[in-house]
Image (spheres, rainbow, N blue to C red):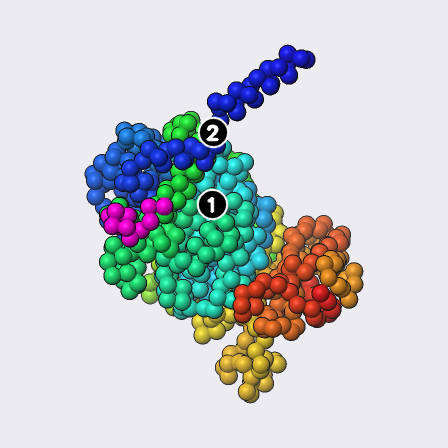
């Protein structure tokens, strides 16, 4: 025993005398050896040459030479064990042998793709979301990737903006929870694990509030609104240890985010004490010139570094300008040291100085190339993301023995489309993706017949295939129509001014409806679409987003009732584009509309209801849920007490099912006006048919806090409405009084 203590003491002594330097010490030592150019080199990121995710300025030979000279810190869009190894070898020829970081947009899965992110958000299933990112990280890391440019935690209230597809919708509370789940999934057991990638909270900040929903457009809003609605997911990400941040293309109140000292220096690196690094968005440093914020590249570089941008993604401005700016004394060398230090820290944490090739491993890549378990999970996740919008006459679920089914629409036999936007790892093997036709065919009884007609293309005006589709429908007992927008019509730079079904799809639907056959409509989209005619005339509607590799199977599982749908909308669905932005947590105004008929001198449209077509949090199930009266532990609270809220939910229908129980509050009066409702909690519960479950929530003054006009974050004594329900427009309410 004594000997063990002796050895332990000796080894600890050894460590403190000679051993383990901290990462900070290692970074400081390395910085001391680096030239100014080498430091700035770490702040440079180029894209690989095979495919680009932005307007690339290629000159591949020059980039390769720069890497060898130690003038590049990171590459994006270089993936695969072989390719990353080849690039890393170049970096190992540099004087100080500082390894490259490989970044990639791993947005909704990697080799196995999952529903587009907004679809995932519709699952309200934080565990599944986290697991999907765990899988994405494991697969991506096996392909040599160190860093994903995700999660996108931009709150967005405008479905015209194509990138709503990539986020978690309109709500700050839900968006924050989902962002945290994603970060946990990506970073797993921590940076340095071989199955973890560095996450990146983007786009800092307010990118989702682009005027008119037009991508890259300006953002103009009060700092109160910015802090209350758009920044919380970022703050939470910083606190949770997200490895990096990416800033955004937009200006915020006239200052481009890329050079925005308020958000990047005062808040992120100041008040929030964030120690990771900030990468610019693609070309966003150089874009400060057309913004009209920098006269030339020189000024753009200066303003970007002063504003807190640590790494230049593809503007190619830092290397050309920063060394000169430092030498001229216009930029403090300490800013370069700080940025470089932040980047080197991550490289040490990832273990790249121990082995720069540790993520470039052919064997792991092979194992993760077509992983059956991951696909199995993808199938389940896909089915959990579907939202049932309508089921008149309980037409769903379909019996597997229905004699003849017609599947009609441009998406029926699509494979690649099921990925949606951002699925970079799929260049070659689209046959692995399960089409809707195949998914349905596989589950239909062998004595039943599945017929198919395309009807039309996604977005042209040609109706020549209509008659064949109508004839097919006439022969069927049930028609499944699969319509929507093209998979590349949502995503970056994919804003739309009309967000209906594209081309002649709605005309096709009307023609098929004339046959009088029962129709089930599946809507394929990356955003909320407007489809009023269908909503009002078609008996069953499932919102199927883009569900990923296993799309067809996920859809069939819900169609035939193997899975009872439990998804709920993470965004309000507008009635028309003129109603945008429409979101549930709006202010009341001084003249709130009382109802949808009396529109005189109230805050309403004379030609349109105020409420959305489908509200935030809405989604049906094949079963029915009944809520008991909610019980509050008290209606008069003081100070830091906790309010306990409970409700019993009973499954009174015919199927086992999942329900998302939602808790909202309203602060009735404040020194600034407060929203009519704010989500403050939710629980996704499974209840067997005929059974009940008690659901408990807790509320503390922490959840009552808000930003006042001086940006103080606090709560006030007063009355609050506590609301529980199945969606934002179907709640029961009790009033409480809470005194400080
Ligand atoms: C621009 C996009 O805005 C950003 O989200 C993405 O990560 C980069 N391009 C890299 O592809």
Q: Which residue is mark 2?
A: 21
Vertical order, 341 against 592 (above or below): above
Q: Position of residue 590 (x, y in %)?
A: 58, 81
Report whether residue 626 is seen.
yes
Q: Is residue 550 shown left or right of residue 341?
A: right
Q: Is residue 432 shown left or right of residue 401?
A: left
**Which residue is nearer to you in this view: 305 or 515?**
305
- What residue appears at the point 68 percent right and 65 percent down from the top-left corner? 723
Q: Secondary structure at mark 1?
A: loop
Residue 518: image tag: none
Q: Which residues are magenta?
A: 324-334
- What residue appears at the point 25 percent right and 50 percent down from the top-left corner? 328
**Which residue is nearer to you in this view: 25 or 546?**
25
Q: Residues within 10 Å of mark 2 (few under 14, many from 20)?
A: few
Q: Position of residue 39 (x, y in %)?
A: 32, 40
- What residue appears at the point 28 percent right and 50 percent down from the top-left corner? 329
Q: Is label 2 in contact with label 1 (beta carbons under 8 Å)? A: no
Residue 275: image tag: 1
Confirm whether the magenta stretch covers residue 329.
yes
Image quadrant holding the N terminus, namely top right
Q: Is residue 695 shown left or right of residue 562?
A: right
**Which residue is nearer to you in this view: 631 or 121?**
631
Q: Secondary structure at mark 2?
A: loop
> Which residue lies most toward the bottom here?
600
- What residue appears at the point 33 percent right and 33 percent down from the top-left corner? 33
Task: Using the rendered view, name the quadrant where residue 64 is placed.
Answer: top left
Q: Residues within 10 Å of mark 1 (few under 14, many from 20)?
A: many
Tell me how far mark 2 sits from mark 1, CA to CA: 19 Å
Nearest to N terminus: mark 2 or mark 1: 2
Q: Position of residue 77 (x, y in %)?
A: 34, 42
Q: Position of residue 608 (x, y in %)?
A: 51, 79
């Amino acid at each position: 025993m004594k000997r063990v203590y002796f050895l332990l003491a000796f080894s600890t002594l050894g460590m403190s005398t000679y051993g383990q330097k901290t990462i900070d010490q290692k970074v400081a030592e390395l910085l001391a050896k680096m030239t100014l150019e080498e430091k700035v080199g770490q702040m440079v990121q180029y894209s690989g040459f095979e495919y680009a995710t932005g307007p690339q300025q290629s000159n591949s030979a020059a980039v390769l030479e720069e890497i060898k000279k130690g003038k590049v810190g990171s590459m994006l869009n270089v993936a695969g064990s072989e390719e990353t190894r080849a690039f890393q070898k170049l970096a190992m020829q540099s004087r100080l042998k500082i390894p490259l970081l490989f970044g990639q947009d791993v947005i909704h899965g990697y080799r196995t793709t999952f529903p587009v992110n907004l679809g995932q958000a519709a699952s309200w299933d934080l565990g599944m979301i986290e697991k999907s990112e765990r899988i994405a990280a494991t697969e991506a890391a096996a392909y040599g990737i160190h860093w994903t440019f995700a999660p996108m935690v931009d709150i967005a209230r405008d479905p015209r903006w194509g990138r709503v597809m990539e986020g978690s919708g309109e709500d700050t509370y839900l968006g924050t929870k989902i962002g945290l789940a994603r970060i946990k999934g990506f970073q797993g057991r921590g940076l340095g694990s071989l199955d973890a990638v560095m996450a990146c909270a983007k786009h800092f900040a307010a990118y989702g509030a682009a005027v008119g929903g037009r991508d890259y457009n300006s953002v103009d809003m009060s700092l109160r609104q910015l802090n209350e609605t758009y920044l919380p997911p970022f703050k939470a990400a910083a606190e949770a240890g997200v490895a990096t941040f990416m800033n955004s293309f937009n200006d915020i109140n006239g200052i481009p985010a890329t050079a925005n000292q308020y958000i990047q220096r005062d808040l992120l690196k100041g008040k929030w004490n964030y120690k990771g690094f900030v990468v610019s968005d693609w070309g966003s440093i150089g874009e400060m010139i057309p913004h009209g914020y920098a006269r030339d590249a020189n000024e753009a570089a200066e303003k970007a570094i002063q504003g807190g941008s640590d790494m230049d993604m593809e503007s190619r401005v830092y290397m050309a300008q920063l060394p000169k700016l430092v030498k001229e004394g216009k930029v403090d060398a300490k800013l370069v040291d700080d940025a470089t230090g932040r980047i080197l820290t991550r490289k040490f944490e990832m273990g790249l100085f121990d082995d720069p090739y540790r993520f470039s491993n052919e064997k792991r890549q092979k194992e993760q190339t077509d992983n059956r378990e991951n696909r199995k999970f993808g199938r389940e996740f896909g089915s959990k993301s579907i939202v049932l919008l309508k089921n008149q006459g309980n037409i769903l679920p379909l019996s597997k023995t229905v004699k003849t089914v017609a599947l009609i629409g441009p998406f029926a036999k699509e494979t690649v489309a099921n990925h949606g936007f951002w699925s970079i790892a799929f260049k070659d093997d689209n046959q692995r993706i399960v089409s809707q036709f195949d998914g349905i065919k596989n589950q239909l009884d062998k004595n039943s017949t599945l017929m198919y007609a395309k009807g039309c293309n996604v977005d042209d005006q040609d109706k020549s295939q209509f008659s064949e589709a109508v004839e097919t429908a006439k022969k069927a007992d049930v028609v499944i129509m699969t319509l929507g927008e093209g998979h590349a019509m949502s995503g970056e730079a994919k804003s739309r001014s009309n967000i209906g079904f594209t081309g002649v799809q709605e005309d096709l639907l009307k023609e098929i409806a004339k046959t009088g056959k029962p129709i089930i409509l599946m809507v394929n989209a990356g955003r909320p679409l407007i489809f009023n005619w269908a909503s009002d005339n078609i008996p069953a509607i499932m919102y199927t987003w883009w569900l990923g590799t296993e799309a067809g199977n996920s859809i069939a599982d819900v169609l035939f009732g193997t899975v009872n749908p439990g998804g709920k909308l993470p965004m309000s669905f507008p009635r028309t584009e003129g109603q945008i932005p429409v979101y549930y947590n709006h202010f009341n105004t001084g003249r709130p509309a009382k109802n949808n008929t009396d529109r005189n001198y109230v805050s309403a449209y004379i030609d349109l209801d105020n409420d959305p077509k489908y509200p935030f949090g809405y989604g049906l199930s094949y079963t029915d849920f009944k809520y008991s009266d909610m019980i509050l532990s008290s209606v008069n609270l003081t100070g830091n007490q906790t309010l306990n809220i409970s409700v019993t939910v009973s499954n009174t229908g015919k199927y086992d099912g999942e329900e998302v129980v939602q808790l909202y509050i309203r602060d009735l009066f404040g020194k600034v006006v407060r929203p009519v409702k704010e989500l403050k909690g939710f629980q996704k519960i499974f209840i067997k048919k005929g059974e009940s479950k008690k659901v408990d929530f807790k509320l503390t003054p922490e959840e009552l806090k808000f930003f006042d006009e001086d940006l103080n974050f606090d709560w006030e004594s007063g009355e609050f409405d506590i609301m529980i329900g199945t969606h934002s427009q179907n709640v029961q309410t009790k009033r409480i009084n809470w005194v400080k």
